[in-house]
Image (tube, rainbow, N blue to C red):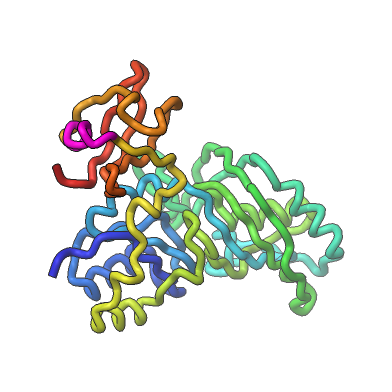
Amino acid sequence: MSELEGVLAVFKPAGFTSHDVVAKARRILGMKRIGHTGTLDPQVTGVLPLCLGRATRVVEYIQELPKEYVATLRLGMSSDTEDLTGTIMETVEEVHVTEEQVREALQTFSGVISQTPPMYSAVKVDGKRLYELAREGKTVERKSREVEIYEIEMLDMVWNDKYPDITFRALCSKGTYIRTLCVDIGQALGVPGVMVKLTRTMSAGITADHCLTLEEIAEHREAGTLEEHLIPADQAIAHMPMHTVLEEKRKSALQGQRLSSRFVAPEVKHAGHFRLYDLQGTFLGIYELEEGGAIAPVKVFAQV
């Protein structure tokens, strides 16, 4: 049986780390070459694309794409982890906010914002992950980083005893901490906030509708129907422009030789990565336009 190749969209269950999902998939599929495209905390559920076989070579490009989340934020309390897995650090007697105030506060986070990574995160400082330091009871200074919130909207507001639970949707750039966003929204409303629940509903254009559970993956593998559910590597990076190489230069392109942009249609005029195909529609790989105007391979997929 040939090795599977492509992107497998998994719906990650609660209680699993992203690495747990990869390990489980390796056992189910009987293959080692599997990579995930963005870490999710154990309690978070949702879309986790796995790259199988040679498709692992596009992980870095998929990771860069926007992600969408649906989160529930509780106003009136805070924790040391910014979610309910941690120790509650602060509570208030009561919260006075209206739906209109919440909607207005959410909109102030639209666009480019600055975030400080939480102590309970996988960011490394001096070679050590922040969550490792946090477990030792240490707090260190973290550099803020800019992320972008493309869309944010309130979906629901329900009172949970004396505290309101706000459910909202956010479409954002790579590296956005939704837990921190929840805390910052609370601060904007003048009260502590904590994330109660989080689901990733979209990653790299792949939605929950495209996903299989680990149980369904095992069933399809047993039935021999799993390949029907794989997204080809080139489709997973469809955000990259598509170009075609002339037949007489196909072999040169696959051998890693630099080509003049006039052998590619449409002509490549802008710097950056693009997908290259032959006249038969076979995906050859990822190429780029160099400063001198030549086209060079970045990652070749097809055989000579």
Disc count in the image? Answer: 0
Where residue 8 appears, as percent x and y from the top left, is 35, 65
Q: Main secondary structure of the magenta part?
A: helix
Residue shown at the point (79%, 75%) measured from the top left: 162
Q: Of 194 and 46, which appears nearest the observer?
A: 46
Residue shown at the point (25%, 83%) measured from the top left: 223
The reply to whether residue 89 is visible in this rendering is: no
Where residue 110 appears, as percent x and y from the top left, is 70, 46
Q: Of 151 and 164, which appears nearest the observer?
A: 151
Among the 4 quarters of the image, the one containing residue 36: bottom left
Residue shown at the point (45%, 27%) measured from the top left: 270
Q: Quarter of the image for the C terminus: give it.
A: top left
Where residue 101 appears, as percent x and y from the top left, is 84, 58
Q: Residue furthest top?
A: 292
The reply to whether residue 10 is visible in this rendering is: yes
The magenta-colored residue range is 246-254
Residue shown at the point (22%, 31%) measured from the top left: 249
Along the horizontal axis of the image, is 185 left or right of 18?
right
Where residue 45 appears, as percent x and y from the top left, is 49, 70
Rendered view: 19 above or below 38: below
Rendered view: 14 above or below 130: below
Along the horizontal axis of the image, is 257 left or right of 173?
left
Rendered view: 233 above or below 213: above
Q: Would you say residue 25 sits in the magenta stretch?
A: no
Q: Of 17 and 205, which appears nearest the observer?
A: 205
